[in-house]
Amino acid sequence: LGLVDRHCFYYYIPTYDKAFEAYSPGKVHISMLIEECFARGLEKFDFLRGCEKYKFDWTDRSVPYFAVSHTRKSPAVALRMACNTMTHAAKGFIRGLGRRH
């Protein structure tokens, strides 16, 4: 599973079948994903958090991440923030669909 937002592909939930591990299907898949992302004009490929070894087969650097918390003062504020987040995500998803070949 991957997500696209603001010219970046987020590699969210990678999986593979251990029975085929010797054939490196994960490496082939990542290679093809990276090629496709840049062919579609995306500027970044983000493996997201974690220091798994396979990620450093593709890059020699990492970017620190951080968390931000927010105290919601009312249910209305929480609802408005949730709607804004969903609207933003939906727009990114729709833009991604428009780039399909």
Image (tube, helix red, strand yellow):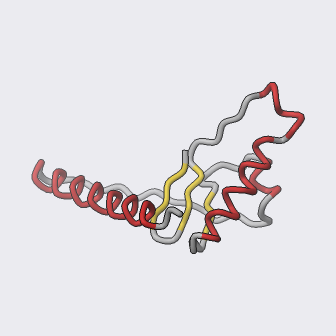
Q: Residue at x 50, y 62 (%)?
A: 100
Task: Give the left or right position of residue 60, taking residue 42 as reference.
Answer: right
Residue 2 location, x and y as percent? 54, 50
Quarter of the image holding residue 87? bottom left
Residue 54: x %, y % from top left: 78, 48
Q: Name the residue at the top extreme.
A: 19
Q: Residue furthest right?
A: 22
As drawn, is 70 to the left or to the right of 38?
left
Q: Nearer the viewer, residue 49 or 45?
A: 45
Residue at the spot 51% in from the left edge and 71% down from the top edge: 7
Question: Which residue is at the far front?
Answer: 101
Q: Quadrant of the N terminus?
A: top right
The quadrant in which residue 18 appears is top right
Number of marks present in the image shown: 0
In this rendering, the answer to whether 77 lies above or below 26 is: below
What residue is rendered at 40% in x and 58% in y?
93
Q: Hey, which quadrant is residue 56 in on the image?
A: bottom right
